[in-house]
Image: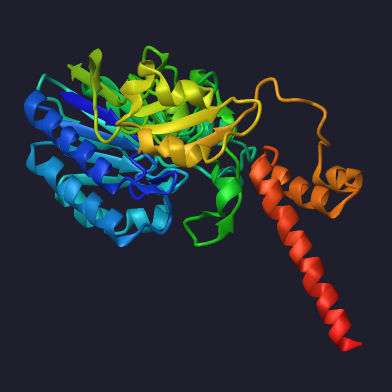
Amino acid sequence: MLILHTSDWHLGRSFHGTGMLQAQREVLDQMVDTVRERGVDLVLVAGDVYDRALPAADAVELLDAALADLVSAGARVVLTSGNHDSAIRLGFGGHLMGAAGVHVRTRMDGISTPVVFPDPEGGSVAVYGIPYLEPRHAGQVWDVEPNHPAVTAEAVRRIRQDAAERCGGPAGDTAIVVMAHLFAAGGAGSDSERDIGAERPAESETGDLLVGTLGQVPVTAFDGVDYTALGHLHGRQLMAETVRYSGSPLAYSFSEAGHTKGGWLVRTAGGRVTGVESVDFSAGRKLAVLRGRIDELLEGTEHAWAEDRWCQITVTDPVRPPQAYRRLKERFDGLLNFVLDPEGAPATAPSTYAARLAAATTDLQVCTGFVEHVRQRPATASEADLLASALQDSRRRADQGEGSAA
């Protein structure tokens, strides 16, 4: 059997205010092509299918179309809920979808009930789905410590127990695959993984609102499992030979500019994993992270490669250049994140606006100090002249008004 391990689709997500639905559609089409061209039998989606618990209608439509296309291409699908998903909403219709080849695992009480597939190469494959577990809720239900290592260990214990009963004796030719959405100890994170506890309450199977944080789970929790397909971290990475993150299929932060996006192709035969290889995806605009003084960024040919990419640009001039964003945007129309990080800036200016006000001795210094505080550079001579003229005119009008009132 050939299995495609993916995760963290985050359908409906935006990137610095820019919609990503078209890029997500493109990368899902590439997955469908991979299924068709490589003869993939099973696709795993290890959580964070959507970017939020209440996905927009166009994100729901995209998932519906993608699942239909994957099944039409010849694959069956198993997906679990992540910390961005609503387990209840994602799991709606799961029983019906299972009959069509799409198996949804979002409930705690289904953790020890695998989806078993006959392996074309002999034996079978049992896929156990561990949805995102909110520690306080899961700990209370299972009477274990309310933290991620403890509730994950209990989930895996239940899986091992079922697998021993199911796969012992003559059924011992079954490969055990576990899907889980969590932060494995030693994993490399990125800026786009958000802790659900900091964003919104988690939702239990009873509809109760809960708050939790993502703790780190030791990789050894999955010892003895033939393959563990992890989700949550957005970089594709090897935690152990049999424990891997597929990463997200698209970059969702500039910290992922150096990532190669894709997933893992896992081959099984006769009840064991016989090989794992990477598969790459490429969709949407690529990313560029640039840093330097504005003249170098605007005039240097060495930055031409970034002109058609989404860009994060850090300007390091000691004093903020005039109209820096507009000028950079003319060359790099994909500029999404502008950062000012002055290098060698003079340390003589007051560090706060209050200190700047206290140091001002004239009305003009108050005005030019405000300009410098907002723009992070001193007012130019022409700006100072305009402010001085405006102050003089306001005084003249005030004097005229007082005279007429007398």
Q: Residue at x 67, y 39 (%)?
A: 376
Residue in front for this viewpoint, 314 or 232: 314
Give the x, y percent position of residue 139: 59, 43
Q: Quadrant of residue 297?
A: top left
Picture quarter with the C terminus? bottom right
Q: Nearer the viewer, residue 172 or 13?
A: 13
Location of residue 29 by image quarter: top left
**Residue found at x 20% / y 18%:** 267
Q: Residue 17 vs residue 398: left or right?
A: left
- Counting every numbered tag in the picture gives 0
- Give left or right: position of 128 versus 298: left
Residue 48 sits above or below residue 64 on the image: above
Foreground residue among 384 and 321: 384
Tell me which residue sits at (65%, 25%) in the image: 318
Q: 88 or 307, which is in the foreground? A: 307
State the quadrant of the N terminus: top left
Q: Is residue 108 visible?
A: yes
Picture coordinates of residue 286, whole percent (x, y): 32, 29
Rendered position, 238 above or below 361: above
Q: Residue 39 at what x, y percent from top left?
A: 9, 26
Instruction: Give the image location of residue 194, x and y in percent.
Output: 52, 40
Q: Is residue 39 left or right of residue 251?
A: left
- In the depicted structure, whether residue 109 falls above or below residue 227: below
**Residue in the image at 41% along x and 59% along y:** 54
- Can you see residue 260? no
Relative placement, left or right, of 377 versus 347 is left
